[in-house]
Amino acid sequence: MDRRILKSKEAIVEAFIGLMAEKNFEQVTINEIANRANVSRGTVYLHYTDKFDLLDQCIKFHLVQLIDSFLPCGVTGIFPSKASLLHTFQYLGQHAFFYTAVLTNKGVPMFRDRLKAALLRGLDKQIDMDGINRDMNKEMLVQFLASAIGGMIEWWITDPMPYSEADMVEQLWALMERNQMVPQPLNQ
């Protein structure tokens, strides 16, 4: 991609996120985005249909990056290791400005919905329904755990980050172990 195009898109996204951190999504206009990004309205429309498309593309990009942060190449599962979970919390911390903007903005419920959907997909594949979970309803268990993990992430980002990434990983890992959600060693 041409570097000028890349710089324009980065400026537009940065301006958009900055505006969302200041006011509700509904109040953000294309004119404000263009002015803050120091580009014309036409440049914004060249890359995005409207502010809804811009929001959608930002969310898609950051969710893909978030998922990639905890799935090392070729590994499957929602949280394959403590190291990958730590990497995820480090990624969240590094991109806290974006996540804070979308999680605190009243006009952006779709981010929570997409985050929860990603957690549901991963948990549904990974949850162990043997042992203590044998008599549980899997759908209810997955819904509960996705809400809990999503809630912990949201609380940690919006509080803002009252505990270190390592502390969050230790506590979340312990909770996941209690619910048989962590990968088991191959010799078991």
Image: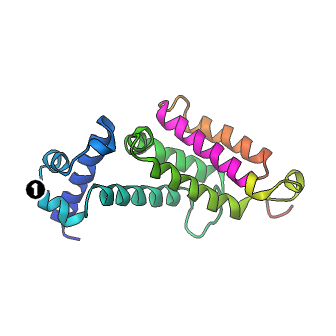
Identity, as a three-letter code, of the amino acid under mark 1: Ser
Q: Quadrant of residue 102?
A: top left
Label 1 secondary element? loop
Is residue 147 depicted above or below 56 in this figure? above
The crowding category of the residue bearing disc 1, from other C-alpha atoms within 10 Å (few below 14, some 14 to 19, many at least 20), is: some
x and y, in percent, of residue 65 in the image: 45, 58
Q: Quadrant of residue 124?
A: bottom right
Please tell me whether the stretch drawn in magenta is mainly helix, strand or loop. helix
Q: Nearer the viewer, residue 181 or 85?
A: 181
Q: Quadrant of residue 173?
A: top right
* Residue 175 visible at all: yes
> The magenta stretch spans which residues?
141-159
Applied colour scheme: rainbow
x and y, in percent, of residue 69 in the image: 51, 56
Is residue 76 depicted above or below 38 in this figure? below
Is residue 11 rendered to the left or right of residue 89? left
Q: Nearer the viewer, residue 25 or 84?
A: 25
Q: How many marks?
A: 1
On the image, numbered disc 1 is attached to which residue?
40
Residue 154 included in the magenta stretch of the image:
yes
Quadrant of the snapshot with the N terminus: bottom left
Q: Residue at x 40, y 60 (%)?
A: 61
Quadrant of the snapshot with the C terminus: bottom right
Is residue 136 rendered to the left or right of residue 97? right
x and y, in percent, of residue 174 in the image: 73, 41
Is residue 171 depicted above or below 14 in this figure? above
Residue 147 included in the magenta stretch of the image:
yes
Q: Residue at x 52, y 53 (%)?
A: 113
* Residue 182 visible at all: no
